[in-house]
Image: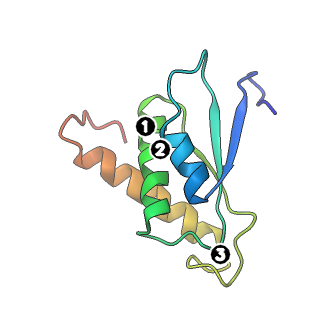
């Protein structure tokens, strides 16, 4: 799968193993667009969410924002059935992390 600019898309689910693999994947031959599919087990402040934020910070600083897919979230998820809650959560956490970084030059 690739986006309009021809950049390949790496789609992962918000599962511990897949997020860990993403965190250990560096130095590809070219830019890759990462998309994280949120699953119901993902909770604000949980270990998976923190790793997604970390990946989002790295992606934002590389001018290649992380995509977050909320298609699979249901009313049973910690974010509820409203995808906007999940998107706002990750947006705010990524922005705060960048702003609070000691090396921040206010990228957010």
Near-viewer residue (33 or 5): 33
Residue that badge 1 annotates: 58
Does residue 97 lie above or below 76 as drawn? Answer: above
Query: x and y percent of residue 81 in the render?
Result: 68, 79
Q: CA distance from mark 3 to mark 1?
A: 26 Å
Q: In the drawing, does residue 52 fall left or right of residue 105? A: right
Q: Secondary structure at mark 3?
A: loop
Q: In the drawing, does residue 48 fall left or right of residue 71? A: left
Does residue 105 lie above or below 42 as drawn? Answer: above
Mark with earlier residue (3, 1): 1
Residue that badge 3 annotates: 82
Residue at the front extreme, as displayed: 17
Residue that badge 2 annotates: 55
Query: x and y percent of residue 15 in the render?
Result: 61, 59
Q: CA distance from mark 1 to mark 2?
A: 5 Å
Which mark is nearer the camera, 3 or 1? 1
> Quick check: marks 1 and 2 in contact, CB under 8 Å?
yes
Does residue 77 lie above or below 17 as drawn? Answer: below
């Amino acid at each position: 799968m690739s986006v309009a600019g021809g950049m390949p898309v790496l789609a992962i689910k918000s599962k511990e193993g897949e997020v860990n693999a993403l965190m250990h994947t560096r130095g590809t031959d070219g830019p890759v667009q990462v998309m994280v599919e949120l699953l119901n087990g993902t909770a604000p402040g949980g270990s998976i969410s923190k790793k997604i934020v970390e990946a989002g910070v790295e992606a934002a600083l590389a001018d290649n924002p992380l995509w977050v897919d909320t298609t699979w979230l249901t009313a049973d998820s910690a974010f509820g059935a409203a995808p906007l809650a999940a998107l706002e959560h990750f947006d705010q956490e990524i922005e705060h992390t960048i702003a609070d970084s000691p090396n921040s030059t206010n990228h957010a």
